[in-house]
Image: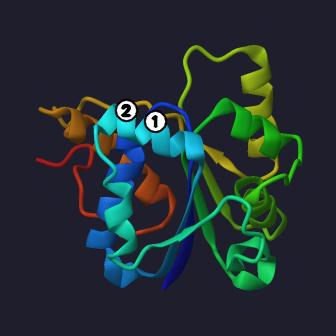
Amino acid sequence: MQRIVIAITGASGSIYAQLLLERLLQLRSQWEVVSVIMTKNAKEVWKTELDNESFLAFEQQGIRFHDKHDFAAPFASGSGQFGTMIIIPCSMGTLGRIAGGQSDDLITRAADVILKERRKLICVARETPYNLVHIRNMETITLAGGIICPATPSFYSRPSSINELALTVVDRVLDLAGLDNKTYRWGSA
């Protein structure tokens, strides 16, 4: 059973976080704990992009939310035994602070813990185009053992809605996290 921490930053792409949380609820038998850190900006972007505050409903379904300054959260230490962290969407500011080793909030501290413990950090980068600083920060995180998974949807499954298109990214993230997710696979009929 996995222990997963999700960080939602203020980058555009709230749909990815929403769909990931929905998928995780569908895969409930595969995880023990899912904890979420959501920045103030992430809440504002969510309201703007999705025209709702549906993130509040996830807490009522067993997903734990933590303030970004709650350093007493179990995943702020390696002894908390969280094996996977997904930052979705991951702003370039957050990516840069992680690459620079700055643990100034719970998101960057948790990412630092995941990397130092040699566990799985998945950063769903949401920016375009990338500048050289972004690319070097991605390189640093990759060299430290993290996974950069740009929020780049695929089209071979012929998605017919925005949600289906965004799910092509979310399903890839779930694969990277090691969860058994039934989804379209290349070459399947």
- Residue located beneath label 1 in the image: 45
Residue at 37% in and 40% down: 47
Amino acid type assigned to the residue bearing label 1 in the image: Val
Amino acid type assigned to the residue bearing label 2 in the image: Thr
Residue at 37% in and 32% down: 48
- Residue located beneath label 2 in the image: 48
Left or right position of 80 against 20: right
In x, y percent, where is residue 45? 46, 35
Residue 127 can be seen in this image: yes
Question: Taking 1 as reference, is 123 above or below it?
Answer: above
Observer-nearest of 44 and 74: 44
Residue at 84% in and 52% down: 104
| In contact (CB < 8 Å): disc 2 and disc 1 | yes
In x, y percent, where is residue 188? 17, 49
Please rate how many residues cluster around mark 2, counting C-alpha atoms within 10 Å: few if below 14, some from 14 to 19, many from 20. few
Asked which quadrant contains residue 128, the reply is: top right
Residue 171 can be seen in this image: no
Is disc 2 placed on a helix, strand or loop? Answer: helix
In x, y percent, where is residue 107? 70, 56
